[in-house]
Image (cartoon, rainbow, N blue to C red):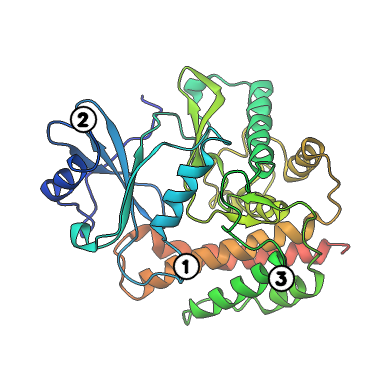
Amino acid sequence: MTLTDQTISSREGEELNVQVIDRYLKSNIPGLSGTPTISQFPGGASNLTYLLDYPELQLVLRRPPHGHKAKSAHDMGREYRIISQLGSSFPYCPKAYVYCTDEAVLGSEFYVMQRIDGIILRSDMPAELNLDADKTRQLCKNFIDRLVELHHVDYQACGLGDLGKPEGYVQRQISGWTDRYERAMTPDAPQWEAVKLWLKEKQPADHPKPGIVHNDYRFDNVLLDPHNPMSIIGVLDWELTTVGDPLMDLGNTLAYWIEANDPAPMQLMRRQPSNAPGMLTRREFVDYYAQRAGIEIDNYDFYYTYGLFRLAGIVQQIYYRFYHGQTKDKRFAQFIMMNKLLEQISLQVIGKSTL
């Protein structure tokens, strides 16, 4: 069994024209020869991602989905710029090759980057990795260390100071995700009224030291070295990255972090092996992050609840496209149930919170 990411034939309606893309790439990337084999990565619920396999080089192409697009989402040029400029300070970004704004080529903008051939952890820890609880715990700490490292990058020195506005970041995220959620409402979607009110009332001041926030940092967006799976060699999916409050980014990551003791409905939502023996709990995750970052975090409930609400907003935006027939990907049919579950989890957190 291979542990590196495998591709599939392109999904119906999402195929690329081999001749067109090959001609474009050969005119923009020196040294390419032969005809690429094109296949699609099955993961990813937002942008479409393809493997372009040339005889001497493997490339990855990312483009927006078809149909309704959330405002400011799927900005290929922005993502290309981030990985191009961040790489010198955070050496886990794939190498960026070319960004195309000519929609006559593929029908949308797109960019092409290096393929990092590594192991991506999905729902369950592969037995083939032979990671006992101690090694799993260390891998988890390495995962958090990379997040702390990213948050401490000097974004001004990278030329990314204009990527976002740190002042008022917390307030903008709460109001912004409230607006995005409401625009993506479908008749079967929950309202989230109590949670939205609580988040508005409990929002803290902005973090005194803003940083690069990835906004989608999970194990299924990092690549492990196939020869040393304790080592992280790549971080993927920079489409939501900005400059802002690192603790809001921590909350985003916690929203995906399903513990071994979480109830069965939450386990069905799990997309990474955060339940494996040795993995830190959410509380331990926060404590280790705080220790490594040299800060205190006494309002973790707020950031976790924000992460859950934001995740519901992302889920609902994707479900909106499915509901209106703009995507045929059947995975998205269940997203409405995930949204409802996320609201229930949030209400439970609020009910126990001392904030």
- Front in this rendered view, residue 103 or 197: 103
Residue 281 position by quadrant: top right
- Front in this rendered view, residue 88 or 344: 88
Residue drawn at (43%, 65%) of the image: 318
**Amino acid type at mark 1:** Ser
Say whether marks 3 and 1 touch (CB < 8 Å).
no
User: As displayed, is residue 178 above or below residue 204?
Assistant: below
The kind of secondary structure element at disc 3 is helix
- Bin the neighbour count of mark 3 within 10 Å (Cα to Cα): few under 14, some 14-19, many 20 and up: some
Kindly identify which numbered label has been placed on residue 31. Answer: 2
User: As displayed, is residue 185 above or below residue 211?
Assistant: below
The earlier-in-sequence mark between 3 and 1 is 1
**36 left or right, relative to 169:** left
**Residue on which the image places disc 1:** 72
The earlier-in-sequence mark between 2 and 3 is 2
**Amino acid type at mark 2:** Gly
**12 left or right, relative to 285:** left
Residue drawn at (71%, 36%) of the image: 280
The kind of secondary structure element at disc 1 is loop
**Residue on which the image places disc 3:** 171
Residue drawn at (74%, 77%) of the image: 197
- Bin the neighbour count of mark 2 within 10 Å (Cα to Cα): few under 14, some 14-19, many 20 and up: few
Q: CA distance from mark 1 to mark 2?
A: 34 Å
**Amino acid type at mark 3:** Gln
